[in-house]
Image: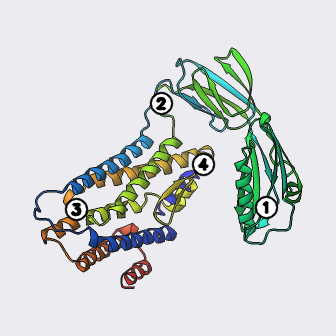
Amino acid sequence: MISSNFSYLSNIVLSGYSQMNQMKYMLAMSGSRNTSSASSVKSVTKTSALSDEDTSFIKSYQEKMTQLKDAAEAVLNPKTNKLTAVSGDSAVAAAAGSLQNSSDVYRVDVQQTASAQVNRSKELNSTGELPSVGGGLTIRSEKGVFNLNLSSAGAKTNKEALEKFAQKINSVNAGVTANVVTKDGKSSPEISGATGSEHAFTLSGSFAESMGLEDAAVESRDAVFSVTKNGTETESFTFSTNEVDIDGFSITLKGEGSTEIKASNGEKTGVSTDAVSKLIDSYNSALKFLNDNSGKGVGVLRQMRNMLMTPISERSMKMIGISVGSDGKLSLDKAAFEKALRETPSLTKELTDTLASGFRKDAEQGLNIRSGSLLSATNNSRASGGKSSQTAISQSQMDTFQLMSMYNRTGVYNMSNYYAVGALMSQFA
């Protein structure tokens, strides 16, 4: 079932929404380039040698592409250590670091994980006026007793007022953190502490009473677990956090149950959230660099075009916690990614590997682009001894037409005529 679903998803290269994001990104890029081209064009007497600026650009370009390639390689072929600690069930506990001996086996039994107390209030209409309520709030925590008077003076909406309250609560360092949760047009204050029973707190006062903040939605508690080493030595623990150091390596408690932690013996340990995060960061950094230097040459535009056509669809990326912004930037929700790893490990690894393979190919293609193509716009200007502002802008517009033409010729990546016609009309708006 997983295999057929993935086959279907793999054929969805770009959704309509993703295509619109890419076109918006190109048009925003084109607008930025059109307004800056005239100021960047200058006359030079020597046309055979690269300027220091161009040399620096080529070096930086190669570094960005190399970093992207290396980040993709780290996802596809992670370096392994024979003593790397590996958890058999990451939903119970994740492991990091190295064991002392390859024969060591640690059984971890988790009775409960540590949690932080959370108090949530009733919801208010975000844009509505704040109801007439008393402003008294008393916080009792391990740090002492704090009496606050929360005033909504100057706030125009419920959300603004609640944000003012949260800011004031956080400013007194009472051992709790206040946030405003907004969803579906509703906003509510949420006050939480640190994990562990020792960090419990109470809320009272007219504001807490009227908003329903007195009762905890989540109780604070300690982590309770035991560790058995090599089947003989068992120790029980109670910790205020879920981060635990044992014999030189660390474990993070995730849920109730049992798991064994062993040495990897040089085997691949699977998909690393940290490696995927670094890949996303490298992609975003490379894409920004290309956009910032989009006026250099048509080779830069081609490389940006290639990278905007992501190896898997936006829908597929969303399944593993990766979202696409309207500017083409990717964002990784680590919690969502790790959840996908637990629930659909094979599919998640397959999608992640496909994404990394595509980015590695993009980087390799980028490294093979001729320097002359990357600097073609600048070189053309130099060969003519410098161009007028109007000529420079016209050349930039032509580069954009060429870019959209390339989109129209790319087979499975073929853009809809509606997008192409709209974009062309925007050039004359």
Q: Is residue 300 left or right of residue 346?
A: left
Closer to the chain start, of discs 1 and 3, is: 1
Residue sitting farthest toward the top: 232
The x and y percentages for residue 224 are 76, 29
Nearer the camera: disc 3 or disc 4: 3
Q: Is residue 1 left or right of residue 199?
A: left
Q: CA distance from mark 1 to mark 3?
A: 59 Å
**Which amino acid type is marked by label 2?**
Glu
**Which amino acid type is marked by label 3?**
Leu
Label ID, residue 305: none
Closer to the chain start, of discs 1 and 2, is: 1
Bin the neighbour count of mark 2 within 10 Å (Cα to Cα): few under 14, some 14-19, many 20 and up.
some
Rendered residue at 41%/71% (across/down) = 28
User: Do callouts 1 and 2 mark residues in contact (Cβ within 8 Å)?
Assistant: no
Q: CA distance from mark 4 to mark 1?
A: 43 Å
Q: CA distance from mark 1 to mark 2?
A: 59 Å
Which secondary structure, mark 2?
Answer: loop
Give the residue number, with chain letter if any, for mark 2. 267
Q: Does any portion of residue 196 appear in the rendered image? A: yes
Bin the neighbour count of mark 1 within 10 Å (Cα to Cα): few under 14, some 14-19, many 20 and up.
some
Please, is residue 108 above or below residue 217 in the view? above
Answer with the quarter of the image where residue 146 lies. top right
Please, is residue 125 above or below residue 69 in the view? below
Q: CA distance from mark 4 to mark 2?
A: 22 Å
Q: Nearer the viewer, residue 332 or 102?
A: 332
Rendered residue at 52%/55% (across/down) = 331
**Which amino acid type is marked by label 1?**
Ser
**Which amino acid type is marked by label 4?**
Ala
The x and y percentages for residue 34 are 33, 74
Label ID, residue 375: 3
